[in-house]
Amino acid sequence: MPTNIRLPRDARIVILTGAGISRESGLHTFRDADGIWAKVRLEDVATPEAFVRDPAQVQAFYNTRRRDLQDRNVQPNAAHAALARLEREWRGEVLLVTQNIDDLHERGGSRHPLHMHGELLKARCQYCDHVVEERGDLSVESACPHCGLPGGMRPHVVWFGEMPLEMERIYGALAECDLFVSIGTSGNVYPAAGFVAEARAHGAHTVELNLEPSDGARAFAEGHYGPATEVVPAFVDALLQQG
Ligand code: APR
């Protein structure tokens, strides 16, 4: 893959991934024609207000997604593996930030992906903030294993209107990186959609890898388009070769 990048081998890289990277693993995106938000209104399942109004409906939505994620057919794909390889072989720092709540980066070999929108396989107590691993269903009666109170366990995910996680660390890395790569995200949801401008303002080269140019494609200096399982390994190969 031709790339316009000439980077020192120890350059700092920030990668942002979205639902598109997990599409070929069998998980749905949000805003594509067959996406999650075409079937259910986000206001009904992905806001703090929805959880107050109808906690059972919200729990059921995430219970289904948690089960789907653990389906044996849902496995990390070549794009997840390529990013893990980049992390292993690149001499400089690589920070992988994902909007995805699935665990496919971890299963693909990435060591510490930063889940800015939380993690589906974790639950959090609304009363004491304790976070636990959760592979089963949550119910409106589930009790917290830490404080013991029933009824406060919620998916450890960031809903619309809530603050994404680890923002300070992410903005710190964006300010210092030499290369920012956005993969499989439509760029519709802030603050992640603003990362490209932030990185660019600090002098980084910016690249979009996506099935097709996203709405924000013009903000990137370079773009490569096609399925993630093809464009991501090719881009990582090109990076590692020129390094
Ligand atoms: N390879 C690469 N990109 C793909 C593929 C694929 N096989 N399939 C789809 N895409 C692209 C689409 O073209 C689209 O640009 O992935 C993008 C997915 O966009 P969204 O569905 O909007 O998902 P995302 O950007 O991750 O959403 C951001 O919105 O609802 C919230 O919290 C949710 O984290 C999510 C956030």
Image (spheres, rainbow, N blue to C red):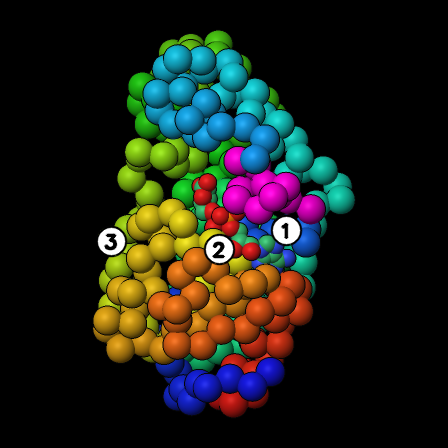
Quick one: label 3, few (<14), some, or many (20+) residues within 10 Å? few
Q: CA distance from mark 3 to mark 1?
A: 29 Å
Q: Position of residue 217 (x, y in %)?
A: 43, 65
Quadrant for residue 236, please give it. Answer: bottom right
Quick one: label 1, few (<14), some, or many (20+) residues within 10 Å? some
Quick one: label 2, few (<14), some, or many (20+) residues within 10 Å? many
Considering only vertical position in the picture, is 90 above or below 51?
below
Is residue 3 found left or right of 220 in the rendered image? right
The answer to whether the residue bearing label 2 lies less than 8 angstroms from the nearest atom of ligand 1 is yes
Q: Which residue in the protein does label 3 denote? A: 168
Q: Which residue in the protein does label 1 denote? A: 23
SS at mark 2 in the image? loop
Disc 3, disc 1: CB below 8 Å?
Answer: no
Name which residue type carries label 1.
Arg
SS at mark 3 in the image? helix
Q: Position of residue 153 (x, y in %)?
A: 43, 20
SS at mark 1 in the image? helix
Disc 2, disc 1: CB below 8 Å?
Answer: no
Q: Position of residue 111 (x, y in %)?
A: 50, 58
Which tag is nearer the camera, tag 3 or tag 1? 1
Name which residue type carries label 2.
Thr
Which span is picked out in magenta?
26-37
Q: Which residue in the protein does label 2 denote? A: 185
Q: Is residue 19 magenta?
A: no
The answer to whether the residue bearing label 1 lies less than 8 angstroms from the nearest atom of ligand 1 is yes
Q: Can I make out residue 101 in this image?
A: yes
Quadrant for residue 125, please give it. Answer: top left
Q: Nearer the viewer, residue 131 or 25?
A: 25
Give the mark nearer the N terminus: 2 vs 1. Answer: 1
Q: Residue shown at 48%/60% (left/top)?
A: 214
